[in-house]
């Protein structure tokens, strides 16, 4: 059943990338979808750790907030780059976190990395190691707004 | 007309951010801080440039393809950065740390002094 549902997005993705509807090409597309499903089945028997993200308004809201944060962080980093005296204070900080589920921790670590100015160098049970371009970045991160938002999400 | 202006704004802003990213890579002091500069080009410059192109093309399959390109760049950024950091740490590099913002004039001064004292 799971694999049957997967054919739908895969097929749509193929149509999106090709844009041709002649019989031969559709047939090739169907063949490649089936091939991918076969690969997935083989990989799942080794890994078996597939996790699902429930797409919700909460997640969409978080992504919009993240986009806004990224834009602000970009402006901050660009200002630091162009300022003649270059006001940076790189530091490698330990950020405590109480997020335990692997999926949320992955989301947290990647959100930190994708924001310019902060970047995750490692994730452990109860903390992340984060490299920050400036003290302000580290301070903002340790106040934990991003973490609180992720904790509230239902994934 | 409005679309034209918007798309040119996206192009110019995106190009400026690309240049900023490159300047950052040249100016910043070590590998880890340079990664921050490279993420500027990936997280804002590329989406802006792609939005500019999207506004220029008519609404078609190409628009969706451009969106896909943008999404994939955004997905790859953390993955690639993570791989680079892991490699650097594995190689034994450790990040530079400063408590105070670096004072370049002073630094040059000290370097010059050292040079003069050795010669």
Image: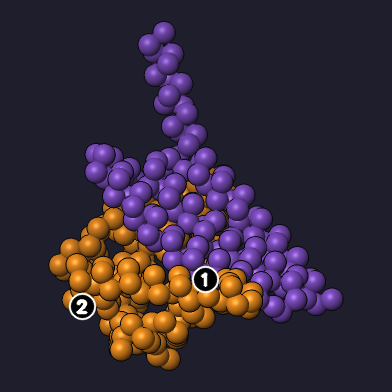
Chain colours: A orange, B purple
Q: Marks 1 and 2, Cα distance to the nearest angstrom?
A: 40 Å
Q: Indicate which label's residue lies in the foreground, 1 or 2.
A: 1
Decide which of A28, A124 is in the foreground and name it: A28
Q: SS at mark 2?
A: loop
Q: Is residue A149 above or below residue A142?
A: below
Task: Say which label, 1 or 2, has the lower sequence index.
Answer: 1
Mark 2, chain letter? A
> Residue at left 50%, top 34%?
B105
Q: Position of residue B41 (x, y in %)?
A: 54, 56
Image: A67 above or below B84? below
Task: State the image quarter where residue B98 is shown.
Answer: top left
**Do we see residue A11 in this rendering?**
yes
Nearer-the-camera pick, A72 or A66: A66
Q: Secondary structure at mark 1?
A: helix
Q: Which residue is mark 2?
A: A101
Q: Quadrant of the N terminus of chain B?
A: bottom right
The residue that appears at 48% across and 37% down in the rendered structure is B104
For the C terminus of chain B, which image quadrant?
A: top left
Q: Is A74 above or below relative to B22?
A: below
Q: Specify the label residue A28 is tagged with.
A: 1
Q: How far across and down, in percent of the image, does residue A25 sit?
A: 58, 72
Q: Nearer the viewer, residue B78 or B105?
A: B78
Residue B117: x %, y % from top left: 39, 13
Residue A44 falls left or right of residue B21: left
Q: Quadrant of residue B45?
A: bottom right
The residue sitting at 64% across, 76% down in the picture is A22
| A19 left or right, relative to A29 | right
């Amino acid at each position: 059943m799971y694999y049957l549902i997967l054919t739908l997005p895969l097929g749509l993705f193929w149509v999106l990338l090709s844009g041709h509807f002649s019989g031969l090409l559709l047939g090739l597309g169907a063949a490649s979808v089936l091939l991918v499903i076969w690969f997935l089945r083989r990989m799942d028997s080794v890994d078996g750790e597939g996790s699902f993200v429930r797409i919700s308004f909460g997640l969409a809201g978080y992504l919009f907030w993240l986009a806004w944060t990224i834009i602000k962080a970009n402006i901050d980093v660009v200002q630091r780059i162009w300022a003649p005296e270059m006001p940076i204070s790189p530091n490698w900080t330990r950020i405590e976190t109480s997020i335990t589920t692997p999926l949320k921790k992955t989301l947290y670590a990647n959100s930190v990395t994708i924001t310019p100015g902060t970047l995750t160098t490692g994730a452990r049970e109860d903390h992340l190691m984060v490299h920050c371009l400036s003290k302000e970045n580290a301070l903002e991160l340790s106040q934990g707004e991003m973490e609180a938002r992720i904790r509230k999400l239902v994934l | 007309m409005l679309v034209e202006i918007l798309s040119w704004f996206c192009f110019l802003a995106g190009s400026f951010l690309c240049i900023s990213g490159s300047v950052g890579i040249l100016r910043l002091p070590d590998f880890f801080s340079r990664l921050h500069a490279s993420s500027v080009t990936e997280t804002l410059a590329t989406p802006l440039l792609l939005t500019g192109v999207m506004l220029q093309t008519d609404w078609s399959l190409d628009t969706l393809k451009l969106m896909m390109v943008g999404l994939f760049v955004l997905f790859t950024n953390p993955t690639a950065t993570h791989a680079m950091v892991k490699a650097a740490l594995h190689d034994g590099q450790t990040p530079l740390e400063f408590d105070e913002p670096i004072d370049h004039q002073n630094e040059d001064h000290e370097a010059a002094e050292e040079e003069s004292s050795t010669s």
